[in-house]
C-alpha cells in the first residue's frame, strides 16, 4: 500500500458498531456518526478505527488530509470515490453523487488503500 497524505482527524462517538475505513456521515446529533449509505449521502469523512458498540470513540479523517479507505469495487489511482450502501468506497455514477475521496493507488474490492479525503458533488456523470 502506498503512503497517504497527513490525515486531519476529529473524534466522534459511534452511533453503533462500525468497521474501520468506511465513509461516515452525521448521526442523530453533532457528536455521533453513522456509516454512509448512498452515493448521494453528504459524508463528513472516513473512519480510521473500528467501534464495537455505540458511544465508542472514532477517529474520522476529514477533507484536506489523507486516510485509508475500504473499497467496494475495483478502482484506479486518481479515481473519485463515493460511499456505497455499506460505507465502502466505490466509483460515482451520476450527477449529484457526493464525492468523499480520491484514490491514491489502484485497488480491488475489499482492499484498503490510501486516499485523499475531499468533498465535492459530481456535476456530470463520471
Image (tube, rainbow, N blue to C red):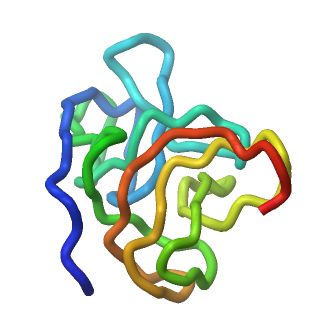
Whole-percent x, y for residue 70 in the image: 44, 69
Whole-percent x, y for residue 93 in the image: 81, 60
In the image, residue 109 sits, relative to residue 121, either above or below, namely: below
* Nearer-the-camera pick, 60 or 94: 94
| Residue plotted at (28% across, 27% down) | 13
Horizontal side of residue 112 vs 51, given as left or right: right
| Residue plotted at (26% across, 86% down) | 1
* Nearer-the-camera pick, 4 or 70: 4
Whole-percent x, y for residue 67 in the image: 28, 58
Q: Given the current orientation, which residue lies at the most extreme top position?
A: 29
Quarter of the picture containing the C terminus is bottom right
* Nearer-the-camera pick, 54 or 7: 7
| Residue plotted at (58% across, 62% down) | 80
| Number of numbered callouts drawn | 0
* Nearer-the-camera pick, 117 or 19: 117
Tell me where residue 114 sits by quadrant: bottom left
Horizontal side of residue 87 vs 69, given as left or right: right
Tell me where residue 111 sits by quadrant: bottom left
| Residue plotted at (40% across, 41% down) | 45
Amino acid at each position: 500500500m502506498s503512503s497517504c497524505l497527513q490525515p486531519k482527524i476529529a473524534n466522534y462517538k459511534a452511533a453503533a458498531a462500525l468497521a474501520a475505513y468506511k465513509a461516515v456521515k452525521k448521526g442523530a446529533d453533532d457528536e455521533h456518526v453513522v456509516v454512509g449509505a448512498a452515493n448521494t449521502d453528504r459524508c463528513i469523512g472516513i473512519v480510521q478505527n473500528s467501534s464495537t458498540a455505540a458511544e465508542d470513540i472514532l477517529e474520522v479523517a476529514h477533507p484536506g488530509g489523507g486516510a485509508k479507505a475500504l473499497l467496494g469495487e475495483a478502482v484506479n489511482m486518481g479515481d473519485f470515490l463515493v460511499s456505497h450502501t455499506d460505507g465502502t468506497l466505490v466509483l460515482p455514477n451520476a450527477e449529484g453523487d457526493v464525492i468523499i475521496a480520491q484514490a491514491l493507488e489502484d485497488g480491488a474490492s475489499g482492499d484498503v488503500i490510501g486516499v485523499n479525503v475531499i468533498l465535492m458533488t459530481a456535476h456530470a456523470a463520471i
